Image (tube, helix red, strand yellow):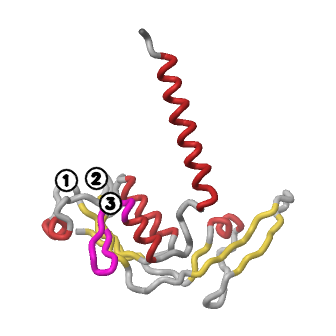
């Protein structure tokens, strides 16, 4: 078993801060900063800094280990979804890499199905990336990662239009 410790940070800088080059930014605790910046080309950029308000106890997460690189997470998109959710919410986690070709006994004891990802929330092991993402969203609502309700109907409409377009295309190309 390989274990990586991810330590919580005092504050998390957004990608816009990294793009602007504010690497030595010192802020007091519990501070939220925002600013406008004009680059030499006249475009306006926003500077955002958000604080992490999570507990110091890291969450235990089991993900697929890489088959080509030792001590690295594998190429499972479901595991990547959970890890991205944890990173975006700035949650500390203890990453356990599982070799799916040779599943260890300790992993099969906590997850008899042997599937990854698995996370320990509220002293209970949860599997399935959709369920994990929803549980993390409910337990740690800030920052919200779900689709806003005002945009959900637009995304649903796109899916319906796409499905109808594909159905009509299949009907029109069908040979009798």
Relative horizontal placement of residue 36, taking residue 144 as reference (left or right): right
User: Residue 43: within the magenta?
Assistant: no
Q: Which residue is drawn at 57% across and 37% down?
A: 161
**Disc 2 designates what residue?**
67
User: Residue 127: within the magenta?
Assistant: yes
Q: Where is residue 100 in the image (x, y as percent from the top left)?
A: 22, 56
Q: Judge the density around disc 1: few (<14), some (14-19), many (≥20) Cα neighbours within 10 Å.
A: few
Discs 1/3, front: 3
Q: Are marks 1 and 2 in contact (CB under 8 Å)?
A: yes
Q: What element carries label 2?
A: loop
Report the label total. 3
Q: Is mark 3 on a helix, strand or loop?
A: loop
In the displayed structure, 161 sits above or below 79; it is: above
Q: In which quarter of the image is the N terminus?
A: bottom left
Question: What number is the disc on residue 101?
Answer: 1
Discs 2/3, front: 3
Q: Position of residue 56 (x, y in %)?
A: 43, 86
Front position in the image: 38 or 57: 57
Q: Are marks 1 and 3 in contact (CB under 8 Å)?
A: no
Does label 1 or label 2 sit earlier along the sequence?
Answer: 2
Question: What number is the disc on residue 128?
Answer: 3
Does label 1 or label 3 sit earlier along the sequence?
Answer: 1
Q: Judge the density around disc 2: few (<14), some (14-19), many (≥20) Cα neighbours within 10 Å.
A: some
Rounded to the nearest angstrom, the CA distance separating label 2 from label 3 is 21 Å
Q: Position of residue 16 (x, y in %)?
A: 67, 66
Instruction: Find the magenta span and give its range.
Output: 119-131
Rounded to the nearest angstrom, the CA distance separating label 1 from label 3 is 19 Å
Q: Position of residue 140 (x, y in %)?
A: 48, 76
Q: Which residue is drawn at 28% across and 52% down?
A: 67
Does label 2 or label 3 sit earlier along the sequence?
Answer: 2
Front position in the image: 122 or 54: 122
Q: Which residue is drawn at 71% across and 80% down?
A: 33
């Amino acid at each position: 078993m390989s274990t990586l410790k991810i330590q919580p940070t005092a504050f998390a800088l957004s990608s816009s801060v990294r793009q602007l080059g504010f690497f030595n930014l010192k802020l007091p605790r519990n501070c939220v900063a925002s600013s406008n910046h004009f680059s030499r080309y006249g475009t306006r950029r926003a500077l955002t800094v958000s604080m992490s308000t999570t507990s110091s106890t890291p969450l235990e997460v089991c993900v697929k280990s890489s088959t080509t690189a030792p001590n690295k997470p594998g190429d499972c998109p479901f595991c990547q979804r959970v890890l991205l959710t944890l990173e975006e919410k700035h949650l500390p986690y203890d990453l356990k890499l599982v070799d799916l070709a040779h599943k260890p006994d300790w992993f099969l004891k906590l997850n008899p199905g042997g599937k990854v990802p698995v996370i320990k929330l509220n002293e209970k092991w949860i599997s399935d990336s959709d369920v994990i993402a929803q549980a993390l969203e409910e337990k740690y609502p800030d920052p919200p990662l779900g689709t806003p309700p005002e945009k959900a109907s637009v995304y649903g409409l796109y899916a319906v239009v796409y499905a109808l377009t594909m159905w009509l295309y299949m009907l029109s190309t069908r040979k009798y």
